[in-house]
Image (cartoon, coloured by chain):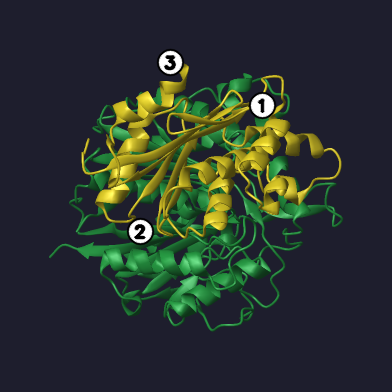
Chain colours: A green, B yellow
């Protein structure tokens, strides 16, 4: 079977600048969502997970000059540097660089001290490539809110085809005035920290994060390792800003990913949902999960911890899913009150230790796109 | 990874006030015509009759026009994958949204500030519930498109792929989409994709 292994990873978020700090926060149900003042909102502000610039610059100082890089670049570079520190022998001339983002350095569209070209996503790719000295042309994926997971699927596909043997997949997005004003115009922003799948959910909270992972065709020597054994994306062909009522694309992507993995829905031990906490998204997911027979699987959304980190989210959440499997830990779906969708779901209410083997990660986004990944824990005898 | 099993079944080109279907020109306007007018005239000429077209941003309009021409002579499977790329992402609509941010922001504009929305619009128009990806590259990258199309076809994730380039910046547009399947005469290769992309400059 064609598969890739998820090796070292790094998370840069308001919950910390390493995977370990992030996991500790999630385990303790600590959220990165805070109130931020903003005149655009009648409530005087919004809840979001925002990284403090000073803390980031201080951490970045160890690898570079903060003033020369945008906030997003600092986040993404820092994430990759964490992985390279652990893998000093990594041959960058043979390691692909796959980048996922929705809006990149969109905040540079207004006046800034950086050259105008820096707003383009391919330029973001070049900045990252040149900083570390990657040799292969970066592959940049901008496919709305499934970008981060799709980047893993693209890595798996190219690695399976022998195009390259290993890649660093990095995703990142900012909480920008650009995106805030847009979601506000959709009346999609929650006046309180978001509550995925809950009866009292009132919309999304935004967040910013960078996530990175080293993926390889080679099985690591560790006693346990996590691989991606199935993946698929599918479009709803229904509406560009609203999900399909029948969850068509999500259903189809889950079916296709499970088929490739040769795993049945019954075998899935844990489901990391998209769960943005908008009325329509969560309802659509509930419908799709029920159609697939996943209603009894322990599931959560990480949006209550991080907010919606857009192009980073599906990658960030896949990395958390990896550690969930490795540690045999189920993390609570933060801010959940009681079920607020029309179909039954098994939402994780409290931290739990449980033997886990297979997990499913899903994501959906504007443009009607959907994605599913099947992760497996492989135990060396 | 060149594999002769797969062929460039058909292709479409939109650039400099002209639309080509294969190597034949199907539409042309005066160069003085602005982008909006060009899109409107092409829509009329191609007899698309799809009122949603008028609500779309220019990048999506280009995608709808191109797919209409490309799919004209073929039965398209709903599993046909869409593999698009460009360099400017959705920058034209990004600027429009940015300008509106001082006052009233429109969700109808904001939704188009993602490059992959064109994949969604084409999927809705042609009922494709398929694999999607949008790559952003410095310039047209035939190797990436060829490799990824082959990977999807080889892995049997799709029976056919529409891949190509759809770029719009400062009202300058450059569209090249091709249908890849087992049918046709032109073998799928990065060299052939490059030649087809460049042909109208000859």
Can residue A309 be seen here? no
Q: Residues within 10 Å of mark 1 (few under 14, many from 20)?
A: few
Q: Residues within 10 Å of mark 3 (few under 14, many from 20)?
A: few
> Residue A356 — which label?
none
**Subunit of label 2:** A
Name the residue at the top extreme: B202
Circle 3 is placed at which residue position?
Answer: B202
Between A142 and B168, the residue placed more toward the observer is B168
Can residue A306 be seen here? yes
Identify the residue at image location x=39%, y=40%.
B10
Between A265 and A346, the residue placed more toward the observer is A265
Q: Could you tell me if the residues under marks 2 and 1 are in contact, i.e. CB atoms within 8 Å?
A: no
> Helix or strand or loop: what does disc 1 sit on?
loop
Quadrant containing the N terminus of chain A in the rendered view: bottom left
**Subunit of label 1:** B
> Helix or strand or loop: what does disc 2 sit on?
strand
Q: CA distance from mark 2 to mark 3?
A: 42 Å
Q: Is residue B151 above or below residue A189?
A: above
């Amino acid at each position: 079977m064609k598969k890739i292994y998820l090796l070292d990873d790094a998370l840069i978020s308001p919950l910390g600048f390493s995977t370990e700090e992030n996991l500790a926060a999630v385990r303790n149900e600590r959220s990165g969502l805070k109130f931020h003042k903003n005149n655009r909102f009648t409530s005087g502000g919004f809840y979001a997970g925002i990284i403090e610039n000073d803390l980031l610059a201080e951490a970045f100082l160890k690898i570079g000059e903060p003033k020369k890089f945008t906030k997003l670049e600092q986040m993404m570079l820092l994430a990759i540097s964490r992985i390279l520190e652990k893998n000093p022998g990594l041959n960058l001339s043979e390691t692909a660089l796959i980048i996922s983002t929705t809006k990149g350095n969109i905040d540079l569209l207004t006046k800034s001290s950086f050259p105008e070209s820096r707003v383009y996503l391919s330029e973001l790719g070049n900045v990252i490539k040149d900083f570390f000295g990657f040799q292969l042309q970066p592959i940049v994926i901008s496919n709305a809110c499934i970008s981060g997971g799709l980047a893993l699927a693209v890595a798996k596909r190219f690695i399976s085809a022998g195009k390259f043997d290993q890649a660093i997949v990095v995703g990142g997005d900012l909480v920008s005035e650009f995106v805030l004003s847009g979601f506000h115009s959709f009346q999609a922003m929650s006046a309180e920290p978001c509550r995925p799948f809950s009866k009292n959910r009132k919309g999304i909270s935004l967040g910013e994060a960078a996530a990175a992972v080293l993926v390889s065709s080679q099985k690591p020597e560790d006693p346990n390792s996590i691989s991606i054994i199935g993946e698929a994306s599918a479009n709803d062909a229904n509406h560009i800003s609203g999900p399909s009522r029948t969850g068509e694309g999500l259903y189809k992507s889950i079916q296709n990913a499970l088929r490739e993995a040769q795993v049945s829905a019954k075998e899935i031990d844990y489901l990391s949902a998209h769960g943005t906490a908008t009325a329509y998204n969560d309802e659509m997911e509930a419908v799709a999960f029920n159609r697939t027979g996943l209603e009894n699987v322990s599931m959560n959304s990480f949006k209550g911890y991080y907010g919606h980190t857009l192009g980073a989210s599906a990658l960030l959440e896949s990395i958390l899913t990896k550690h969930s499997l490795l540690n045999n830990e189920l993390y609570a779906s933060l801010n959940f009150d009681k079920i607020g969708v029309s179909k039954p779901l098994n939402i994780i209410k409290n931290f739990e230790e449980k033997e886990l083997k297979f997990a499913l990660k899903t994501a959906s986004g504007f443009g009607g796109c959907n994605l599913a990944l099947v992760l497996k824990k492989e135990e060396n005898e | 990874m060149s594999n002769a099993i797969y062929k460039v079944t058909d292709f479409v080109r939109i650039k400099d006030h002209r639309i080509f279907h294969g190597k034949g020109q199907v539409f042309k306007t005066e160069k003085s015509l602005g982008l909006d007018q060009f899109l409107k005239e092409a829509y009329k000429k191609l007899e698309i009759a799809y009122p949603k077209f008028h609500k779309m941003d220019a990048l999506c309009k280009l995608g709808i026009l191109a797919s209409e021409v490309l799919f004209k002579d073929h039965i398209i499977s709903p599993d046909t994958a869409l593999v698009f790329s460009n360099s400017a992402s959705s920058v034209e609509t990004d600027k429009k949204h940015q300008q509106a941010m001082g006052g009233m922001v429109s969700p109808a504009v904001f939704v188009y500030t993602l490059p992959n929305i064109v994949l969604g619009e084409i999927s809705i128009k042609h009922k494709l519930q398929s694999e999607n990806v949008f790559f952003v590259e410095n310039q047209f990258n035939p190797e990436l498109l060829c490799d990824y199309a082959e990977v999807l076809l080889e892995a049997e994730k799709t029976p056919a792929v529409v891949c190509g380039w759809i770029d719009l910046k400062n009202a300058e547009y450059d569209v090249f989409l091709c249908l890849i399947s087992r049918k046709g005469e032109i073998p799928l290769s990065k060299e052939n994709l490059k030649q087809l992309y460049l042909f109208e400059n000859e």
